[in-house]
Image (cartoon, rainbow, N blue to C red):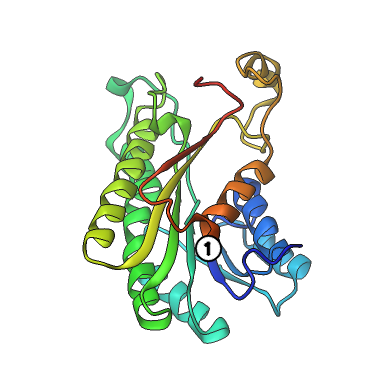
Amino acid sequence: MSDRLKGKVAIITGGVAGIGLGIAECYVREGAKVVVTANHNVDGGHAAVAKFGDDVSLFVQQDVASEADWKKVIDATIEKFGKLDILVNNAGVGGMGAAIEDLDLADWQSVIDVNLTANFLGEKAAINAMKKTNDAKGSIINVSSVAGLVGLPMAPAYSASKGGSRLLSHATALNLAQRGIDIRVNSVHPGWIDTAIIPDAAREQIIKTIPVGHLGKPKDIGEVCVYLGSDESEFANGAEFTVDGGQRA
């Protein structure tokens, strides 16, 4: 541990498994206190707190598309740790793989709600909390995807939501900076990361498309998020960080 995040408090949505847990592990290693959230994986939330220790971590069950739940998470964070320095909007869903003319409106909306509307709600809640508890300073990291940079043919809702997250990050960063508010906003764009969502049957074929010859690890995203949450990245604002093993090079 090098204490790059010592004294900082972070909320990490979807922080109990996969990429989110990888981010949380890196944050705790670097001295941060973390609030991890999930909607359905409650057991994973309790396991994360047991692993990290309840002195440096807290689990809150959260529907990220609910404004009331964002208030609950912010209130719990401030009650336990006193402030908020960092928000990592990581929670996301893939949605149905379908041609756009076959996609139900309900399926489209559910992806937009979790992957994009939730980013807006999180930014709104975090900015207000940072103003009240942290002298209007902080860092917001929106975990988008390479699918927010190029379209996925059979995932129109996912690509639209992740592209929206990317431009929401740009717009919020500019809005805050132009008003003299020292809260930075950046987006991270993972490629293929070795998590449970990758089907075993497709694993080898996916790896063949990655120039470095292997899947990424959740830790690979976590390390980028450490940089963006730390004071080292004070000049990084409104930027995109692609972590995909060279796939888009």
Would you say 85 lies left or right of 52 here? left
Quick one: 122 or 237, which is closer to the camera? Answer: 237
Residue at the location (65% across, 54% down)?
Answer: 21
> How many numbered marks are there?
1
Provide residue 178's location: percent of width, then percent of height. Answer: 22, 60
Provide residue 219's location: percent of width, then percent of height. Answer: 68, 45
Q: In this view, does 100 lie above or below 32?
A: above
Residue at the location (69% across, 19% down)?
Answer: 201
Helix, strand, or loop for circle 1? helix
Badge 1 crowding class, 10 Å Cα cut-off, few under 14, some 14 to 19, many 20 or more, is some
Provide residue 211's location: percent of width, then percent of height. Answer: 63, 17
Under mark 1, the amino acid is Asp
Quick one: 176 or 50, which is closer to the camera? Answer: 176
Residue 15, picture quadrant: bottom right
Res 85 visible: yes
Res 39 visible: no
Provide residue 153's location: percent of width, then percent of height. Answer: 39, 18
Quarter of the picture containing the N terminus is bottom right
Label 1 sits on residue = 231
Residue at the location (31% across, 23% down)?
Answer: 100
Would you say 213 lies left or right of 96 here? right
Q: In this view, does 229 lie above or below 108?
A: below
Would you say 25 lies left or right of 120 here? right
Residue at the location (35% across, 27% down)?
Answer: 156
